[in-house]
Image: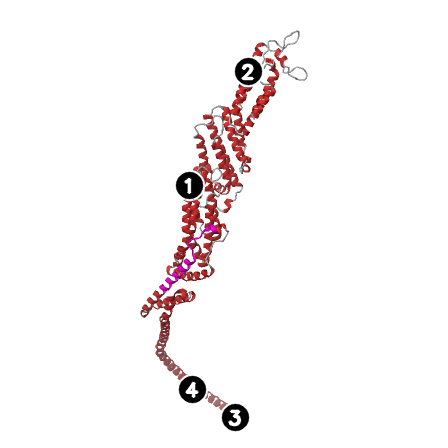
Amino acid sequence: MAVGAVNGRHAADEEARAEVDVLNSRLEKTTQLTKKIQACLGRLESTGKSVRDVAGPLNGETKKLQILGNNIEAVLAAIERLRQPADSKNDEEQIIRMGPDKAGLPNYLASIKRLNRALAEMKASNLRATQQTVAELERLIKLGNTQLESSFDKLLRNETPRAIEPLHFLTKNKPFPVLSQDKFARLGLMNSYVASVHRQSSGGGAPQDSPIAKIYIEIRSQYLASSLVNLATASTSTAKKKNADAIYRAGTSGIGTYAQAMEGLFLAEYENICNIFTREDWGPVFEATCQPSLVELGRTLRELNGHIKSHMSTDCYLAYEIVEIISGLSNNLERRTGELKSSLAASLKPVRETAKSSLSELLEETKKRVHSLQTLPSDGAPVPIVSETMQRLQTMVEFLRPISSIMISLGDGGWKSAAASRGGVGDAIPSLASFDIGADGKEIFAHYCTDTIEALMMALDSRARLLLQKKPVMGVFLANSVAIIDRAIQTSELAPLLESRLAALETWRKKATSLYTETCKDVSVHLFDVIHTSRGMGGGGGGGGGRPTSGQGGAGVVDSASILKGLSSKDKENIKGKFAAFNASFDDMVLRHKAYTMEREVRQLFAKDMQNMIEPLYNRFWDRYHEVDKGKGKYVKYDKSAIAAVFLTLY
């Protein structure tokens, strides 16, 4: 049993050993195989590296060959394209030489554009072989552009008259003519091409410098200037009155018609430009086209300004009218086109400055004219400058719109300084809003009027005190002036402006009345009686007559005889002397009153004042002492009814 067990173990060991041997054999084979595989991988890697070393340069050369091939193909294509213009040059040249009229404008423009593209491509290639073709294409394009400009010139000239008569369109209320729609299309196409070429060649130069714009500006500016030249001449000739001293009346000058025609022509021209040129070119081309006409307007306004300065007192109103008209023209054109405001402002500047300075100059001129008077009427008659000054203010009301704008720019009281009148906002055109006659404009003008009136009255008063000296004559003179001023205000459009500012005028009226009624005081002094009695008025036993009373009895009736009985002989003689002195002074006053030259309202005013001052005193004096000459009329010349009748003759 033991032997069997040993044998069994031995067999198992042998079997295990045999398996180990098999495994070791397989491991050895695997190791050998791994070595072979590693050897193969080494050889493969070595072979791959060799292949890479050989294939790398070949791949680079292949890419270079591909690029070269592509370049060759591009050059061949370019050459083919370059050959096409050269091949078709004869066809394009035939179209160009036919001109836009015969070839048809669209076909002609398409041909020029093709030539331009071909020329650009040839210049980009910079091939020596194409230089001759480039030169020929440039010559052909230049010819095409020249013919296009000539066609534009011809077409525009045929459509543009030398001039038109603006009055025909203004009087019949017709719109000013513009170019026809079919011409707009042709001219617009030509300009579109030439303008684009100009922008490309000049690097964005001024629109008005393009050949087409220059042609348009030359032709149309001459047309505008020729159409307006007669109206410009008429504006200056109509301003020169036959009677140099006559006051300018609104609308007398042709400047209004001139401005209307200019506005109509300019707006029609702007419509033409908008239909032909591109949006960015409208303003510059419009400004350049209108420039010759604006230069002529500036010359006309300067000539008118010289005339106004030479006749400031009568023609300053023309300056106000021009300011309103040209400002309105500027505002209308700016609203419709957005252009020309600065140009019109520069043209208007001389006249506007004259209009501003006129306010202070006229005020100073009024003072100078009064102070230059060497004599004044001895009968107190007014001097012409009073009515002339008021006529000037009345006329100014007719031009209140422009004067309002001028005064607003000066400021309230700005006319008191000549320097301030000449200063201001320079060339600025007043806006439409500044022509609205609002409260400010009216108030400032009213202030100017009262300043003018006060300056006039102060100058007249100063001159009267120097030349007339006698108070009654001075009173008549000043009252006449006040009456003329007041009447001029009340009977004109000045009334609503100055109705609340007449207090100063009333002060002058009172002063004149005070001066005139000094004579009444001299006459009235004879009607004052001071009676001294020799006996006292005591009671008890005295039988003497007391101081005469002004009346007797309960009814208050004055008894002249009774009063005279109580007077001494000396007192009676004194009363007689008073009557005689009164008669002489009163008669003299009446004669002088009738001899004075007075305005109707002045005569009535002074007559009433004289009657109110003298008649009550005389009636009292007469009631008390008329029996002094016992009705003989030797001393008592007038009874109460007679003196009342005399006063009535003074009115």
Residue 489 on image: x %, y % = 53, 35
150 within the magenta span: yes
Q: Which residues are magenta?
A: 141-168
Q: Is residue 76 above or below residue 457?
A: below
Mark 3 vs 4: CB contact within 8 A:
no
Tag 2: amino acid: Ala
Mark 1 Cα-neighbour bin, 10 Å: few <14, some 14–19, many ≥20: some
> Label 1 belongs to which residue?
307
Q: Is residue 51 visible?
A: yes
Asked if residue 563 lies left or right of residue 581, the reply is right
Could you give the CA–CA distance between mark 2 and mark 1, rounded to whole angstroms?
65 Å
Q: Look at the numbered disc 3 and give the secondary structure of its residue.
A: helix
> Label 3 belongs to which residue?
4
Could you give the CA–CA distance between mark 1 and mark 3, rounded to whole angstroms?
165 Å
Q: Look at the numbered disc 2 and give the secondary structure of its residue.
A: helix
Mark before the other along the chain sequence, 4 or 1: 4
272 within the magenta span: no
Decide which of 504, 55 is in the foreground and name it.
504
Asked if residue 64 lies left or right of residue 428, the reply is left
Residue 312 on image: x %, y % = 44, 38
Q: Look at the numbered disc 1 and give the secondary structure of its residue.
A: helix
Q: Look at the numbered disc 4 and give the secondary structure of its residue.
A: helix
Tag 4: amino acid: Lys
> Label 4 belongs to which residue?
29
Q: Is residue 85 visible?
A: no
Q: Image quarter for residue 240?
A: top left
Residue 536 on image: x %, y % = 62, 9
Tag 3: amino acid: Gly
Mark 4 vs 2: CB contact within 8 A:
no
Tag nearer the camera, 4 or 2: 2
